[in-house]
Amino acid sequence: MSLINSKKLRSLKKRVKNSAKEILNRSLDQHINLAVTGLSQSGKTAFITSLVNQLINEGSGKPLNFFDPVHQGRYIAAKRVPQNNLHISRFDYDDAIEQLSKTEPEWPQPTKSISELRLAVRYYPKNSLLKYAGEMATLYIDITDYPGEWLLDLPMLNQTFEQWSEQMGELLKQAPRSELSAEFLAKVEAIDPFGPVHETELAELAQQYTDLLLAFRYEQGLSVIQPGRFILPGEHAGAPILQFIPYPFFANIEADEYNSAGQDTFIGMLRARYLEYRERIVRQFYKQHFVKFDRQIVLADCLTPLNNGSEAFNDLQQAISLIMESFAYGKSNLITRLFSPKIDKLLFAATKADHVTAEQHGNLTSLIEQLVFKAKKSLSFDAIKMKTLAIAAIKTTEQGQSEYQGKIINVLRGKRLDNQKLITLYPGAVPAKLPKNEFWQEGGFNYIAFKPYTAISQHQALANIRMDQVLQFLLGDKMK
């Protein structure tokens, strides 16, 4: 046998062995695909860093008392292992920990595309069939990080270009977007939809639309951003597939003329690129990644929209409704896990709980519960287990008390993110229900962004709020 054929045979045996091992892990329920998403600035990178950090450094910080394997003394250890999908970027855990370990710690750089990390968690099984297969068991966890803006695109799979354009047009014409959108909409309306299309003109319009989306997100604090990859393009940056815009003026054109418009016309090219984006990018993400997830965490920053006003908060509510449309799944079981894994647990976490005082955590949990209430009823009917929590993946403040107008009140102490000054403040009360007009009229909420407070060592567990409850909900039943 030649050397080349021998190498091919060894490679084939290795692939078959790895594939058989993967199937065995899934059949013994020793593998889980855990997806983490959230809209920009919700704290995805901090969350994944903390989740991995808690498992790797368990015992080097506050005990994970609500995580059964730890509470029952069955947890052994966790370590990072090479990921399976070599074509996906690796989540840079080392860099994140390095940033948090500086003398003046910094927030890790946010991820702008999809990334992955794999953990092997060793434990003593208690009640499952695994205890008969050996004294110890290993749960392999594939953690996938992807932008929440990408998830907002999934409803586009059920929309024609006309339907999507109409929906986006309604948003662009409403406050607070309308003031920034007026000039752009006037320019689009003045274009002959059946005139010849010019690549440079379309590229310029797409860039103007992208600039609007960026302003909506980062200046106005809005959450409904479509297409999501316009502001987080990943590997598609600069590609013509991202150079299209909505056309909110279908009332001005004849349906027959539109249906027969070729790709050499302005409207025909918009439609063609929308369909290409929908099929090649959105549907491919669904097929390659989304349908393979077993469990999903959606992170939501409720505090910044509370601070930005009623329009920003209402937009967050609409974004959550769009996101929840994507979770039309039934309950997972052993058989379906082998052939067609489906999301069977969904955690909605209100992040930055350390930015409010402890007695407000219940209100923050109640608020996120209210935001997902309608969707939760639907999902509960489909037997998906859902949970809402108020968490801080990385705790940045200390709780204290202060006297104000003769009364003792709870306050926070931490370093401001903008100027790094150490401050003490009472941020205000979080509404337990969806806020009404009186809340906004009374001044809303006083949100201050904090930076990491104290540095950690490389092998120290990060201070957090309720990450043990997160682990229990997502992994507890897999480590029995």
Image: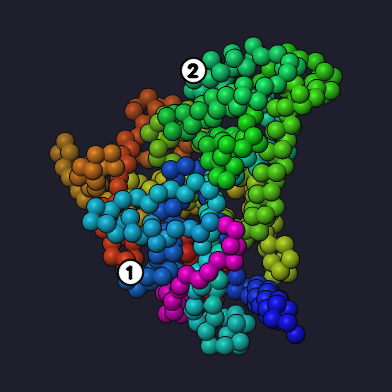
Q: Is residue 99 above or below residue 403?
A: below
Over which residues does the magenta segment extend? 68-88
Please identify the quarter of the rendering in which residue 73 is found: bottom left
For label 1, the SS is loop
Which residue does the numbered mark 2 point to in the structure image? 179
Instruction: Give percent across and percent down for residue 287.
Output: 70, 52
Residue 464 vertical placement versus 72 (above, below): above
At label 1, which amino acid type do we have?
Answer: His
Horizontal side, residue 92 vs residue 360: left or right: right
Image check: 44 left or right of 343? left
Q: Amino acid at mark 2?
A: Glu
Compared to residue 348, the image places residue 62 above or below, namely below
- The reply to whether residue 276 is in sight is yes
Looking at the rendered image, the quarter that the N terminus falls into is bottom right
Question: Would residue 372 be seen by someone viewing this image from the given angle?
Answer: no
Q: In the rendered image, which residue does mark 1 sit on?
A: 459
Residue at x-position 41% and y-position 53%: 46
